Amino acid sequence: MEIFPHTCFLESQGSNLDFGEVVHTDLADGPYSVVLVCEHASNRIPDALGDMGLSADALQSHIAWDPGALAVARLMAERLSAPLVHGGVSRLVYDCNRPPEATGAMPLRSEDYLIPANADMSDDERHSRIEGIYKPFAAALSNLIAENRTGLELMVTVHSFTPVYHGQQRAVELGVLHGTDDRFAQAMMATVPADPPFVTRLNEPYSAADGVAHTLDAQALPTGLPNVMIEIRNDLIKSPSQQQAMADCLVSWIARTLIEFQKGGAT
Ligand SMILES: [Zn+2]
């Protein structure tokens, strides 16, 4: 069969790559008022990609994932009875908080590291990662939101960031970030907890200008679902007790903010 050789090539080189489980959805007892997302939960590199040309240390570091974020998100999900959608592949393979057209979706560089496996990628491999990783992740989240939209009041994405970036120490400990819809982020900043007193800043260490608002804008904005992105400095969530304390702090803060938010009729 040589009628469509190009099509055959695309299939064999593209969508047939096995990426394993690229998205996980942890359900809780509904009905749900909050949905949680952790795009950078995993540093798993699918077998088909080997080590991507990176050292074991690099693949354990923050360039590959958000250390501690999944543990905090799971603890939050438990306390909020919220479903949690989390990524099953390293963001170095595909960053599920980036649309396919973004250069950071399959980054050539992350902080000081070049990502050899992402240089000179064929169109087929690029296509394969979009179809095999990004689209299933986005579909899992959008389906969950659609199925529960009536009762949903908020979407929260949970991330962590490195305390030292390009050799510079970061003072910010908690970042509250927004995309196009800033309502809930502003409401959270109006109710920042005094205890424990984290250094909390709006749109730090990143902001929508860095392209980090993709999930917020693509998944929550279309139906007007209030949304916020939380960035946690990862040295604050290394141990299970730190993760529990952070989850408790965030859940109480979010619950308090939701009450104020609804009083204001902002939903
Ligand atoms: Zn992240």
Image (cartoon, helix red, strand yellow):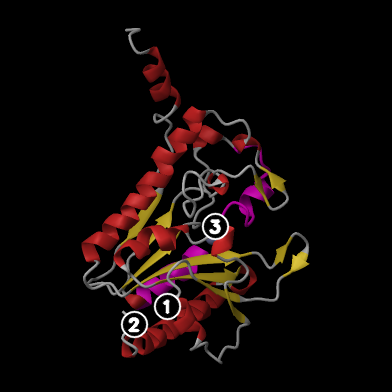
Q: Quadrant of the C terminus?
A: bottom left
Q: Quadrant of the N terminus?
A: top left
Q: Is disc 2 surrounded by few (<14), some (14 to 19) or many (20+) residues within 10 Å?
A: few
Residue 163 location in percent, x, y? 68, 68
Tell which circle, 3 or 1, labels the residue nearer the N-terminal end.
Answer: 1
Left or right of 106, for residue 139: left
The residue range painted magenta reads 51-79
Q: Is disc 3 surrounded by few (<14), some (14 to 19) or many (20+) residues within 10 Å?
A: some
User: What amino acid type is highlighted by mark number 2?
Assistant: Ala
User: What amino acid type is highlighted by mark number 1?
Assistant: Arg
For mark 2, what is the residue? Answer: 266
Q: Residue at x 24, y 71 (%)?
A: 29
Q: CA distance from mark 2 to mark 3?
A: 26 Å
Q: CA distance from mark 1 to mark 2?
A: 8 Å
Residue 36 location in percent, x, y? 39, 67
Using the rendered image of the protein, determine whether residue 189 is visible from the camera's viewpoint. Answer: yes
Residue 152 location in percent, x, y? 28, 72
Quick one: SS at disc 3?
loop
Mark 1 touching mark 2, by CB under 8 A?
yes
Ligand 1 image position (quadrant):
bottom right
User: What amino acid type is highlighted by mark number 3?
Assistant: Gly
Residue 260 location in percent, x, y? 37, 89
| 244 in relation to 17, above or below | below
Asked if residue 7 lies in the magenta stretch, the reply is no
For mark 3, what is the residue? Answer: 211
Q: Is disc 1 surrounded by few (<14), some (14 to 19) or many (20+) residues within 10 Å?
A: some
Q: Residue at x 56, y 55 (%)?
A: 65
For mark 1, what is the residue? Answer: 183
